[in-house]
Amino acid sequence: MSFLCAISGEPPRVPVVSPKSGRVFERSLIEAFVDENGEDPITGTALSKDDLIAIEASNIVRPKNASTATSIPTLLASLQTEWDAMALEIFELKKELQSTRKQLSTALYYHDAAVRVAARLTKERDEAREALTQLTTSLGTEAPAAGNGAIDVETMDTDFPTELSDNVQAKLEVLSAQRKASKKARAATVEVDAIKEELKTKQLYTSVSKLAITKSGLILTGGGKSLAGLFSKECQTVQHETKASAIVTSVAALSDGKLALGSKNGHVAVYNDTLEEQLADFDTHISPIVALVAVPAGSYVISADKSGKWAIHDYAKGSLLFSANLEAEISCAQLHPDGELLALGTAQGQVAIYSLRSGNLVRTLDQDGPISAIAFSENGYSMALSNSTAAAAIYHLGKVDAEPPAIVELETVVAALAFDPSGKYLAAAGPSNLAVCYREKKEKAWVAKTIPGSTAAVDVAWINQEEIATVSSKGSIHVYK
């Protein structure tokens, strides 16, 4: 009986729980009881010391028992207990303070390291910009000043692929040799005064903005209601048709006969030569596609959107190879026939020329207005562009710095430009008519001849040396011969 009274006294210092009764006991007392009786003191069921479960005791100082704190020894014991608890608490606080100091010291170290890395990268960037400026100057080209608000050379989203660079270099050597050996094309002539409209179709699609000529001579175009098709001038019908993911804003005939469509929602889709099978689909862009350009070095297509982003895709592998951004709105794009230089026209009046062997911006040309059209001649010597005026500027690529461009005046604002296969004739289309420009030997200047009866056009292309195709914004195709 005295044992039970001892158990029910003040809270236990080393508490344990009996699983038989669920009561809390002082370990020393309950173990002594179990050794003597082998049972739980409450329920009387069998109990061993291994059955006892230790519980966490609170380090809070026990309240004084008024019935026991009546003598000096009891008070001293109580004060000692409180002192021990306070000293233990102070010790724990000092440990936590030391741990916090170590964590803060580590965080400050990492912050200092990050600042040093950022400073080093900034220094390397500035050195790279200076090296690029020196290199382009030695090559006879000019690099744009960094931070000019229009063209930014530090906007590559991905590293330029070595495989693409090697393929472009190999194809460049082949195409350059072929061009130098092709004298027949350069000798071809066009009777400009005899050109007249040969064919006019009804509206094929609404809101048309682009056309392209396929290897088989079909005319690829598309527009509203997400439709695109291949028109045959011989049959005067749409031979094949497909539905894109959104309104078609750009088209291209690729180097291996495949066809590409760019949409208003930023998607780029690649089809076979009859539009019957979709081979690849890319969602690299989120803005409307304004230009698609075929790369002759392989299964590559370049896309450019209105926001300033341009990208190179491998449609055979279905992968994005490279992307970069201009700090300007892209309005048009064209690739040099050798497959190396990519020219991007902007709404801010600049032409940014990139190298497809490195992905670097190698030159800019400034104009007075938004660039509406760019064209390279097939012989590789000339580049024509228009800044949304009734004129076209024709640059000799080997003498860009030595002499100003030749300016040819037109009767309409230029919406599209295209050189013929010989590189001697330039077709210029606009909202009023179609004109063919050529260099007058006697006057040593470029002149323009408006085609009688020609109508408004948003894009133009040479089907061959003798035929020109245009398309209007309302979707009607016109063929001149």
Image (cartoon, rainbow, N blue to C red):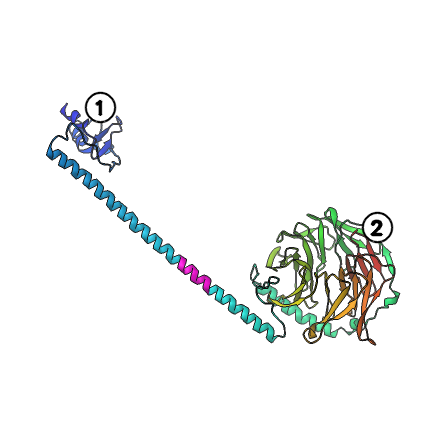
What's the distance in space between the residues labelled 1 and 2, CA to CA?
A: 104 Å
Q: Amino acid at mark 1?
A: Ile
What type of secondary structure mainly makes up the magenta span? Answer: helix
Mark on residue 200?
none
- Where 86 sits versus 113, above or below? above
Which is more toward the observer, 331 or 376? 331
Instruction: Name the secondary structure under disc 2.
Output: loop
**Residue bearing mark 1:** 42
The residue under the point 77% across, 74% down is 183
Q: Quadrant of residue 151?
A: bottom right
- Mark 1 crowdedness (10 Å alpha carbons): few <14, some 14-19, many ≥20: few
Q: Is residue 182 visible?
A: yes
**In the image, residue 15 lies at what x, y percent?**
22, 33
Instruction: Name the secondary structure under disc 1.
Output: loop
Locate the C terminus by quadrant: bottom right
**In the image, residue 298 lies at what x, y percent?**
66, 62
Q: Amino acid at mark 2?
A: Lys
Locate the N terminus by quadrant: top left
Q: Is residue 118 magenta?
A: yes
Residues shaded magenta:
111-119
Q: Nearer the viewer, mark 1 or mark 2?
A: 2
**Residue bearing mark 2:** 202
Which is more toward the observer, 26 or 183? 26
The residue under the point 82% across, 75% down is 443
**In the image, residue 242 lies at what x, y percent?**
73, 49
Q: Is residue 343 visible?
A: no
The answer to which of marks 1 and 2 sits earlier in the sequence is 1
